[in-house]
Amino acid sequence: MRKLLLSAATFALAGFQPALSMAAEAAGAASADATTRGAVAIGAGLAIGVAAFGAALGQGRVGASAMESIGRNPNAADKIFLPLILGLAFIEALALYGFVIAFLLQGKI
């Protein structure tokens, strides 16, 4: 029964799509411009959010792995330090790229 209702709802929504697109065209360029600006603002927020979230996960994982490695072999701390710092710098660079993209998108609003 659920599949039947889902299929009926899908066909009903597909039938409304041409009417919605005609209504959007009738609204004029001002509405389309506002919609585009809203989409750009959402994209800028998502760019910085995803970049920060991914960088935080990556840095946490790198730090945890480094501490585990040093805990297992304390004599290797000197050899682990440089790759740890380089990895953290590269991860942070990716977060900064997201930040730059967000600023570029904000300039288009």
Image: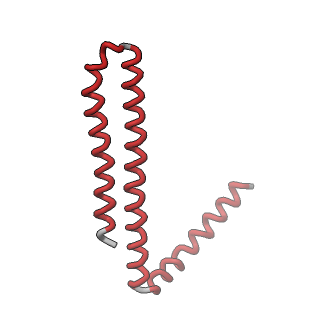
Q: Position of residue 58 (x, y in %)?
A: 39, 37
Q: How many marks?
A: 0
Q: Which residue appears farthest toward the right when viewing the image?
A: 1
The residue shown at (46%, 86%) is 26
Colour style of the rendered protein structure: secondary structure
Quadrant of the rendered image containing residue 92: top left
Q: Nearer the viewer, residue 70 or 101?
A: 70
Which quadrant of the figure has residue 90? top left
Q: Residue at x 52, y 77 (%)?
A: 20
Q: Residue at x 43, y 64 (%)?
A: 42
Q: Classify the position of the N terminus by image quarter.
A: bottom right
Question: How far from the left and from the top, in percent, is residue 101?
Answer: 30, 58
Note whether 19 is above or below 97 in the view shown.
below
* Front-most of residues 1 and 42: 42
- Please name the residue shown 29% across and 34% down the image: 87
Where does residue 83 sit, x and y in percent of width and height?
Answer: 26, 28
- Figure check: 84 above or below 98: above
The image quadrant where one finds the C terminus is bottom left
